[in-house]
Image: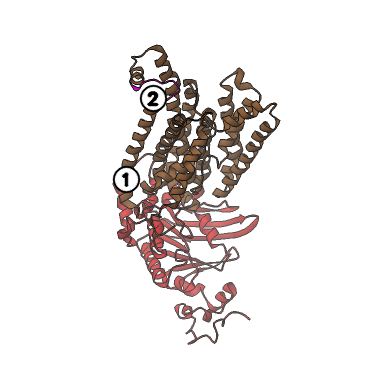
Chain colours: A red, B brown
Amino acid sequence: MSRLSVEGLCVDLGGRAVLRDVSFEARPGEFVALIGPNGAGKTTLIRAICQLLPRQAGAVTWDGRRLDRMDPRARATSLAYLPQGQAIHWPLGVRRLVELGRLPRLGPLSRPAPADRAAVEAAMAAVDVAELADRDATTLSGGERARVLLARALAVEAPVLLADEPTASLDPYHVLEIMTLLHRTADAGQLVIAVMHELGLAARFCDRVVLLDGGRKVGDGPPREVLTRATVRDVYRVDIDALPGLAPLIGAGPAPARPSSPGAGLPQ
Amino acid sequence: MVGNASADRAPALTVALLAVIGLTAVASLMVGPAPIPARAVLGALAGRADAVVSDIVWQIRAPRAILAVLIGAMLGLSGAALQGLLRNPLADPAVIGTSSSAALGAVIALYFGLAKSFPLALPILAVVGALAGLAALLPIARRSQGPSTLILGGVAISALAGAGVSLALNLAPNPFAVSEIAFWLLGSLTDRSFRDVALAAPLIALGGALILSQARALDGLALGEDAARSLGFDLGRVQSLLVAGVAIGVGASVAVSGAIGFVGLIAPHLVRPATDGRPSQALIPSALAGAALLGLSDLLVRLIPTQTELRLGVVTAFLGAPIFILILLRPPAGARP
């Protein structure tokens, strides 16, 4: 069976060790949340997996093949990457934007084949943006943009989808919508790895969390097992009860009805 | 709204631009200091005219018309490619220092009087200058992690080449030499021959081919560098090939015509609203718009009666800047300004 394997990954950025000896494995069908406080190395890890950063040591393999030794286009059809932010630099039509996901499969002169068109339509249908197909993507709302950019990543039809904060700056409705879509994508047999900040979402939607702190992996497993009261306090420096709704999700006991003050739970 | 409606406009735009290019090219053959009736020009084209008329049409006017199309197309194509690469609507061939380093090469030929003893010295040194600028920029292009490094590298090379031109003007032995250099810098297609076409055309073809080979990468870059790389594009290679294509093609253009501003900047803006938004789809229409713009400008140079001959770079700037302002004032296509 296919698997993504990260072995002993070390990455330095600007002379500073950002990732130290990170290893984990993941298989298709899993929805893995990459969590950790700001600066823990989550984005660096996801970019290093995609071979967007040079590494000091370690290796990333997919299906037993080293990603750094793969032809870039073959790699691009194995890993789809949804970067942080919603950058769209030109007023592309939505369908044209989603079609960019097919670029790794197109030669310099070839036209999109029926399979390419089908993949684009399927991706747009999956995230429910078919009715936006002819809109200018730069005029969409944040929620619409997030879905369209996700459709672009899905159109790659890669077995692995890596998403960096796919729900950042979305309202609660669209957050749940994107998380549901990612969950469905994993259920359909893809491996989905997403950088996430909200622990409640990770606990609710993901099968597994990989917790980073200071560039090292400090936890890996089902949310209930990793996100204990002690770990959250040590890694995030907050009391679990200060995070609304998290405690019951991970079985850490009922949350108090109301924190005594908005800042309650922060260490004094 | 972009989408289908504007995608449908692209073929119409292409046809319209081709018509403008064709008409200006024909008009260009009709216009010149020697008053030749249109019928005689057409006769010369068909091979039925006396030797003088035939020589004027074929040896003087035809190369000029061909160069206007080739150079205009190269400038428009380069502008579209650089705007796509740098994701900056203000980019043009001057941004990466090509225009000024080619100009420095030409100025060196003028300053040392090489152009007088060997006429091809000027265009050849201009191409050498463009390639030297490219050689300095390529290591930066390969290493840069974002468009700003490349732009800053281009600014530095531009400044250095500009300093070289200023030095030549400063040290020029007499006012005549100063005006010769200054005049050349204003750009012109007057009295160019098929020797100039033979020099510029292959390099423009090579530069154009290098740019067009990277069209798909420009589309990928619409979503940023990380997204483009994750789609399988080696950005170091993409940048190097695009910058090399621009330097070779624009270098050859500047070598023949002198520095001509604004065409590379505004051609993509003229055509972009009629495309579907993908940078690759703006390349060919921008080349056509550049050819049409330069053809029209070179026609105006000859039609506007002035004591001293108008220079092409002056006309493109006078034509280009107001068009650019009009484009900026045009109501935005969508909600985004």
Q: Callout 1: helix, strand or loop?
A: helix
| Disc 1 residue type (three-letter) | Arg
What is the quadrant of residue B150 in the picture?
A: top right
Badge number at residue B30: 2
Badge number at residue B9: 1
Magenta-highlighted stretch: main secondary structure? loop
Q: Is residue B304 left or right of residue A132?
A: right
B36 drawn magenta: yes
- Read off the chain for label 2: B
Q: At which x and y percent is residue B157?
A: 62, 40
> For this rendering, which residue is in front, A11 or A66?
A11
A148 drawn magenta: no
Q: Is residue A135 left or right of residue A25?
A: left
Q: Nearer the viewer, mark 1 or mark 2?
A: 2
Please state, as top left, top right, bottom left or bottom right, where the N terminus of chain B lies in the image: bottom left
Q: Callout 2: helix, strand or loop?
A: helix
Q: Which residues are magenta?
A: B32-38
Taking the spot 66% from the left edge, 32% from the top edge, the residue there is B169
Taking the spot 63% from the left edge, 41% from the top edge, the residue there is B159
B29 up-or-down from A156: above or below? above
